[in-house]
Image: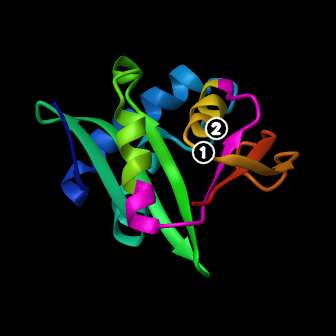
């Protein structure tokens, strides 16, 4: 049974583990430009306090995370990561449904052009490509895609 709840600072280590494991497994082509320690600090000191962060738990273990924000009337899925061992269990679908319910329309997000699995996932959930970049504006310097969902 998967449950969703608002994250708190005590969850930062578990969130960092999901984030790093997912990045290494699913987007190994995009370098981690920060150390695991600095990722933990960022989650603890910046992400959780300044974004709406939701965790997905299975039997009390955090298996997914999502960070949302809103800027000038546009909702953003800033981060969405699932533990590699938990892919295909509907966790991402639950998180996207929660984002739609929380933020309303429109919602935007970026993903890497090379991340075909994520791109298919978002397109299945009604997101449409509205732009591309050469990666010069992201830390990883990897070409990305801007998606948008509207009701």
Q: How is the image coloured?
A: rainbow
* Among the 4 quarters of the image, the one containing residue 99: bottom left
Relative depth, front residue between 43 and 123:
123
Q: Which mark is residue 123?
A: 2
Mark 2 secondary-structure assignment: helix
The vertical placement of 52 against 83, above or below, is below
Relative depth, front residue between 59 and 8:
59
Q: Is residue 144 magenta?
A: no
| Discs 1, 2 touching: Cβ within 8 Å | yes
Read off the magenta span: 99-116
Relative depth, front residue between 134 and 128:
128
Q: Which mark is residue 112?
A: none
- At which x and y percent is residue 146? 73, 51
Q: Quadrant of the C terminus?
A: bottom right
Relative depth, front residue between 32 and 136:
136
- At which x and y percent is residue 75? 54, 67
Q: Is residue 114 magenta?
A: yes
Mark 1 secondary-structure assignment: loop
> In this image, 124 relative to 130: left or right?
left
The vertical placement of 124 against 50, above or below, is above
């Amino acid at each position: 049974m998967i449950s969703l709840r608002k994250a708190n600072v005590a969850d930062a280590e578990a969130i960092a583990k999901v984030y790093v494991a997912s990045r290494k497994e699913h987007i190994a082509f995009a370098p981690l430009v920060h150390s695991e320690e600095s990722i933990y600090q960022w989650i603890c000191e910046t992400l959780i306090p300044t974004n709406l962060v939701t965790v997905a738990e299975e039997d009390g273990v955090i298996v997914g995370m999502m960070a949302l924000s809103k800027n000038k009337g546009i909702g953003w899925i800033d981060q969405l990561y699932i533990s590699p061992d938990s892919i295909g269990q509907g966790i991402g679908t639950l998180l996207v449904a929660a984002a739609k319910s929380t933020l309303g329309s429109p919602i935007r997000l970026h993903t890497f052009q090379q991340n075909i699995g994520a791109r298919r996932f978002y397109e299945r959930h009604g997101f449409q490509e509205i732009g591309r970049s050469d990666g010069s504006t992201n830390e990883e310097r990897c070409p990305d895609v801007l998606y948008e969902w509207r009701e």
